[in-house]
Image (cartoon, grey):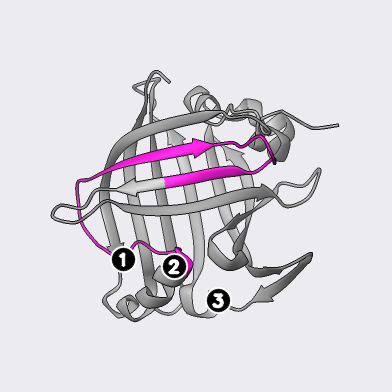
Amino acid sequence: MKDTRPVFQQVLGPGWDQLGEVIRRHYAMAPFSNAHVCVRGTMDEVHHAPWARVLMPFGSLFGALVPYTGTGVPIEVHYRCRPGNARLYWDRIFSFEGRAPFHFRSHMAHAAKGGGEVIEYVRFGIGMRLAVSAEEGALVFRDLGYIWRLGRLRVPLPLGLLLGTAYVEERPDPHDADRFTMKMVLRHRWFGDVFRYSGRFRLGPQ
């Protein structure tokens, strides 16, 4: 029998009710449906370390890295479900000044029934395992390592040695019930922040 509860409700279990209301609302999409939610906002910062430019050709190939830097960058994020599966699909559209809109697309799947883990995939089956938790109303993701999906196999990849460890959070704005903040950082134990971005979003009428 198909479980049509929102993906993160399945992953978090009782922790779902500990999330801020705006976080629950923009993830309250039923799997196996045509549900769609869009949030709009501004990235206060999109940053990567200067040496990380050498990674951009690989990031472009796998669709995994935002190749530009900037401040005050307008962004839309589209979240979608699809009738044929239980995955959650992202399309993040960054509008850097003087450039064509940049799309960062991925999809997320529940790693195991009853476990608080998801895997976010980009092109060619490259994925990041993420532990998911609800913390003070925020939805928090912590990096558990990279994999390569080959059929039913999940082959561990040592990409963290180069990219570092990811941390992501979406946190309700305590002053506005329709807004939340988001930040992502890839931090290397020796080289510091490799990539990071942060911003403010509004969930409007859908």
| Residue 101, above or below 34 | below
Give me the C-alpha separation between circle 2 and circle 3.
12 Å
Q: What element carries label 2?
A: strand
The residue under label 3 is: 159
Quadrant housing residue 114: top right
Assess whether mark 3 and mark 2 are in contact (beta carbons under 8 angstroms). Answer: no
Residue 109 in the image: x percent, y percent? Answer: 66, 49
- Amino acid type at circle 2 is Arg
Q: Of tags 2 and 1, which is closer to the observer?
A: 1
**Which span is picked out in magenta?**
62-91
Q: In this view, does 15 lie above or below 43?
A: above
Q: In this view, does 154 lie to the left or right of 24?
A: right
Q: Where is residue 152 in the image (x, y as percent from the top left)?
A: 79, 64
Task: Please tell me how crowded label 1 is: few (under 14), some (14-19), or many (20+) other residues with Cα within 10 Å.
Answer: some
The residue indicated by pointer 2 is 187
Residue of label 1: 67
Ranked by sequence position, the earlier of labels 3 and 1 is 1
Query: For the point 72% across and 73% down, which residue is it?
Result: 155
Q: Residues within 10 Å of mark 3 (few under 14, many from 20)?
A: few
Q: Are marks 2 and 1 in contact (CB under 8 Å)?
A: no
Instruction: Give the total number of marks visible in the rendering.
Output: 3
Quadrant including the N terminus = top right
